[in-house]
Amino acid sequence: FEIVRTTLIPGILKTLANNKQLPPPIRLFEVGDVVIQEPTKEVGCKNVRRLVAVHCNMRSQFSLLHGALDQLMYSLNCEPEHEQKEGSKRRTFKLEASNDPAFFPGMQAHIICSGIKIGIIGELHPEVLGKKCFEINMPTSALELNLEPFLDWL
């Protein structure tokens, strides 16, 4: 292959850009494979199954996507670290500040589950959404989550 996906976010933003004439809010998700480098593999890389979701509306509604993440994690037998009760058998997850240039500074976080960084969530930067890229002129929240660890845990 000459070109492979290393993230799902650009593909879902292209879909969003092609459907921006629809009335807001626009909510999309995809589950698909990306390729990451893995020097221990014969071909030097491996496929990883990920989930991506976006929420686009006239004003920022990051809390809706955050709520969807909470529900997804709960269905995957995880709970927020700050809500874990003694004796709980669920894995914990938390959000930690991140610094990804695709997202707005201070409005993004890594998703950490059982000490493993499994994804990112936040408000996409206007330069990513704007005229140079996708011409999306509404605030858009996104999350991308690596599903591979859950295959081992469940």
Image (spheres, grey):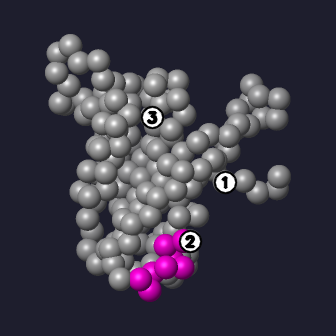
* Mark-to-mark CA distance, 2 and 1: 13 Å
Task: Note whether 29 is above or below 49 in the view shown.
Answer: below
Q: Considering depth in this image, is 136 or 79 the residue closer to the camera?
A: 79
**Is residue 84 on the magenta stretch?**
no
Identify residue for label 1: 5
Crowding at dot 3, Cα within 10 Å, few <14 / some 14-19 / many 20+, comes out as some
Q: Residue at the spot x=46%, y=59% of the render?
A: 29
Q: Write down the residue under mark 3.
A: 117
What amino acid type is highlighted by mark number 2?
Answer: Lys
Q: Is 122 displayed left or right of 16 in the figure? A: left
Residue drawn at 24 percent across, 29 percent down: 81
Task: Give x and y (percent) for residue 140.
Answer: 37, 68
The quarter holding residue 138 reads bottom left
The residue lying toward the viewer, choosing from 126 and 21, is 21
Which stretch did the figure color magenta? 15-22
Q: CA gap, disc 3 to disc 2? A: 26 Å
Instruction: Report which residue position mark 2 lands on.
Output: 14
Observer able to see residue 123: yes
Amino acid type, callout 3:
Lys
| Residue extending farthest bottom | 21
Q: Residues within 10 Å of mark 1 (few under 14, many from 20)?
A: some
